[in-house]
Amino acid sequence: MTLAQALLYGTVRLRRHRCPGSMPDKEAELLLSHAAGLAPEKIFADIERLLDKRSERRFKNLIARRGKHEPLAYIVGSAWFRGLEFEVSSDTLIPRPATELIVDAAIDEVGRIGADLAVDVGTGSGCIAASLASALPGIAVIATDVSSAALRLAKKNAARHGVAGRIMFRKGGLIAPARAAMRTSKAAVIVANLPYIPTAEVRKLSSDVKNFEPRMALDGGNDGLEYYYKIIGGAAALPSKFVIIFEILPKQYRPLAAFMKQKLPGIETGKILNHQGVTIGFRAYGTTM
């Protein structure tokens, strides 16, 4: 099998499965590059080159896995986020473009309120924490998670990008592991991309998401806001000046804003929009004094 034949083989088979946003030709190219250990440009520079038997078997196996809807990121073991490559595993969600906008908003808020602390709640792969530490060398960063496996991966990714020494990794639920640091902070930005899919809607997700990504990182309870309500309910732990940023579904903004204002009267809330003007995030800022 030549490289050209391999690309055709992979593309034809990947056209038989349906995942939102899938691009059979590009995916076949990526998987061939991964299986053969060749950069994409090397493939096309010598397209009639024979693929060795070991690489051919590996490539066909990767194509078969993708044909069963396994996410590309899990197959190749990594995903890109804000220009940085992060190792991923089935213990964590795959980083997504919408979350990049959440991080951008957090970076802006750190400067606006003069925060000296950023807290990444439910860090997963560590992409948010590492991105914040990379972009904001002057502040402390805390990353929390209940999963030991996720924390190990987050530490590994932080080391990969040279920021492991600037992130404090803490095992535990929500903001509890960061309470002591927040109480002594002059101002903090709390960022969370926690499970926010309503339980009834999890089964409606695409096969590559619902069958492969960890359910505990997807299911946010009856209205999807269970974990965010718990963070807001712990407002007594917040520093005197803070900004909270959550990734959400568009329909969740109103109930979340109402709950926040009930718990912290006088709080200001706002939406974070994507490039199409769709709400993808929730922002709240104020003081606890």
Image (spheres, rainbow, N blue to C red):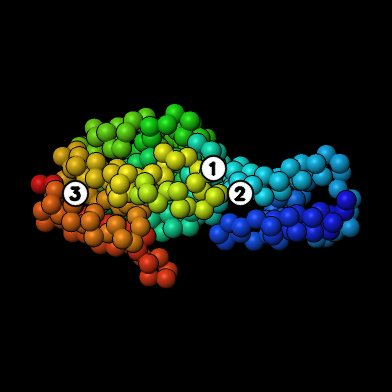
Query: Contact (CB < 8 A) between labels 2 and 1?
Result: yes
Q: Is residue 96 left or right of residue 258?
A: right
Residue placed under numbered mark 3 in the picture: 241
Q: Quadrant of residue 284?
A: bottom left
**What residue is drawn where x is 15% and y is 39%?**
236
- Quadrant of residue 112 in the image? bottom left
Measured along the vertical axis of the image, is residue 128 above or below residue 45?
above
Mark sitting earlier along the chain (2/1): 2
Up-down: is 155 above or below 36? above
**In 3D space, how far apart are the residues under numbered discs 2 and 1 (Cα atoms)?**
8 Å
SS label for mark 2: loop
Residue for badge 1: 212
Query: Which of the labelled discs sits on residue 69, or is there none?
Result: 2
Residue 84 visible to an observer of this rendering: no
Residue located at (45% from left, 53% from top): 204
What percent of the width, then of the height, locates residue 137?
Answer: 40, 47
Q: Residue at x 83, y 39 (%)?
A: 54
Amino acid at the residue labelled 2? His
